[in-house]
Image: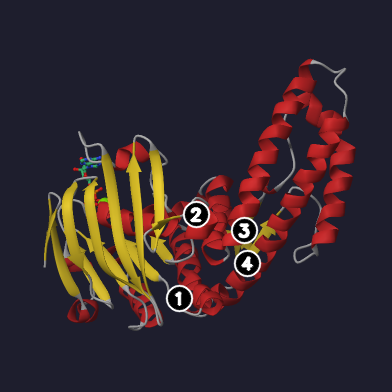
Amino acid sequence: MHIKELNLTNYRNYKNLLIEFDDKVNVIIGENAQGKTNLMEAIYLLAFTKSHRTSKEKELIRWDEEYAKIEGRVEKRIQSIPLEIVISGKGKKAKLNHLEQRRLSDYIGNLNVVMFAPEDLTLVKGTPNIRRRFIDMELGQIQPRYIYHLGQFQKVLKQRNHLLKQMQRDRSINRMMLNVLTDQLIEHASTIIERRFAFLELLRKWAKPIHHGISHQVEELEIVYSPTVEVLEGASKEKIESSFQEKFRQSIEKEIERGTTLYGPHRDDILFYVNGKNVQTYGSQGQQRTTALSIKLAEIDLIYSEVGEYPILLLDDVLSELDDYRQSHLLNTIQGKVQTFVSTTSVDGIHHSTLEKAEIFRVQNGTVTS
Ligand SMILES: Nc1ncnc2c1ncn2[C@@H]1O[C@H](COP(=O)(O)OP(=O)(O)OP(=O)(O)O)[C@@H](O)[C@H]1O
Ligand SMILES: [Mg+2]
């Protein structure tokens, strides 16, 4: 799939922008603070309805304006889909084929995007919530139903935590309601973990050979799900459910004492190992970078295998940071199959073979010239 045109109105530092992209490589060049990341962010937003760098949607509206609008058209093998996001003081609207979609799960998944930005290095070395966010976003875009389960889980989690807080203060509260919420929580938690297992299985399949290649055949990547309940990876939903039942039964007093839900997918983590050693703890910068890159490149193939079309690749400020060898690996992976956006302050660090095939856009203070 690829994005043909993008139309921005009052979005960040763009007042009005209509731009047509190449379906292969688009290089976006500009000095700092001119609007390169803003442009990438707009494409990301069309895919996920969320920014990759802020949760405060008001920030996306151009200063002193009332609303921001992002419109784009995704071209797929057999269809062309208009997408639109409008953000205003009243909230956010997502339109698909000009029709508003009230449920996120009906919107997300129509445009698939893989983004690689400097902050993605924190995927390996950052806190667990970054890795959970990663798996949730990626799973959500290939399996919209996952977003539904996640939403349900979060709703029940909030209710359960609220009740646990009340019980912490007042021990005489009847436990009936807690049992009901625990059962509901287990139902959604188990579905989420079961799907995460399946996703990691795929990610591993694609990432291991890529990583092996980038590391000149000397490193073996392993990706491990680290849950808060005792389940073996790949366990069935029933198995996961019974582990949760057991865990909650054992630790109910502790949960009341703490006033919060101690076990579940909201506390799980993903661990990366290289040659048997945890990369987060022991990996060099280069190893962490290679791991993050392998994961991102793997996603391209993973999405193709699940969705049947290649996603769009956004490389914000990272290409020139990769050495020649990693750059060429990346380019081999995409090989003209994947519509790619590369942003950079200077073409110096970018391989000439990339530039040769690319359409070049220059960004200056919210205006783009090609
Ligand atoms: N809501 C907004 N309204 C107007 N301008 C904004 C808004 N949000 C951000 N900006 C401006 O956008 C610019 C930043 O754009 P962006 O992050 O895309 O820069 P960039 O070209 O990626 O720079 P760098 O090379 O440093 O990463 C800043 O000048 C900032 O002031
Ligand atoms: Mg930037």
Comparing marks 1 and 4, which lies closer to the viewer?
Answer: 4
Category of crowding for the residue at label 2, using alpha-carbon neighbours closer than 10 angstroms: few (below 14), some (14–19), many (at least 20)? many
Residue linked to disc 3: 146
Residue type marked 1: Ile
Give residue 28's quadrant in the image. Answer: bottom left
Identify the mark at residue 199; answer none if there is no mark: 4
Q: Is mark 2 within 8 Å of ligand 2?
A: no
The correct choice, above or below, for 361 with respect to 170 in the image is below
Q: In this view, does 352 lie to the left or right of 335?
A: left
Residue linked to disc 1: 214
Q: Which residue lies furthest to the front in this view?
A: 99
CA–CA distance in space, label 2 to label 1:
18 Å
**Label 2 near label 4: C-beta < 8 Å?**
no
Residue type marked 4: Phe
Q: Position of residue 134 (x, y in %)?
A: 52, 55
Residue type marked 2: Leu
Which residue is more in the foreground, 215 or 122? 122
Q: Position of residue 325 (x, y in %)?
A: 35, 76
